Image: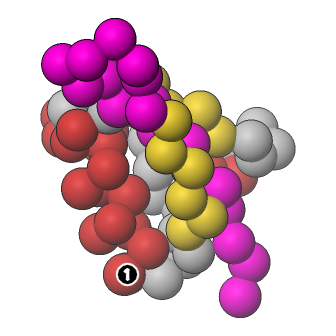
Amino acid sequence: MALQRVVALLVVPCPIAIILSVPLALSQPEGQEVCERLVAQADVLIENNLPRQIEKLGVTWERLSAIN
């Protein structure tokens, strides 16, 4: 199972930002669900995949922007 790394920056009401880094198996439905929950709360999403690889897994700008 290939793991995809998703890094989300969550801004909280304090002077210190919390950086949350979670490896997710985006090829699995559970990984997709966790990704959606993180994106709903995140201000920044950084992924490190080859071009179009993340889109093949169904994680597109349109989908994520609709969630957030």
Give the total of numbered labels: 1
The answer to whether residue 61 is left or right of residue 12 is right
- Residue pushed farthest right? 50
Say which residue appears at 74% left-offset and 78% top-offset: 2
The answer to whether residue 20 is left or right of residue 34 is right
Instruction: Give the residue type that dot 1 points to.
Output: Pro
Q: Nearer the viewer, residue 25 or 22?
A: 22
Residue 34 highlighted magenta (yes or no): no
First to last magenta residue range:
1-18
Secondary structure beneath label 1: helix
The answer to whether residue 8 is left or right of residue 62 is right
Is residue 19 among the parts visible in the rendering?
yes
Give the percent coordinates (x, y) of residue 18.
43, 33
Q: Where is 55 relative to 28, above or below?
A: above
Of the 4 image quadrants, the one containing the N terminus is bottom right
Give the percent coordinates (x, y) of residue 63.
29, 42
Q: Quadrant of residue 22?
A: bottom right
The answer to whether residue 31 is left or right of residue 23 is left
Q: Quadrant of residue 7?
A: top right
- Residue pushed farthest front? 15
Q: Where is 22 relative to 14, above or below?
A: below
Say which residue appears at 25% left-offset and 17% top-offset: 14
- Residue pushed farthest top? 15
Give the percent coordinates (x, y) of residue 29.
37, 81
Say which residue appears at 59% left-offset and 33% top-offset: 46
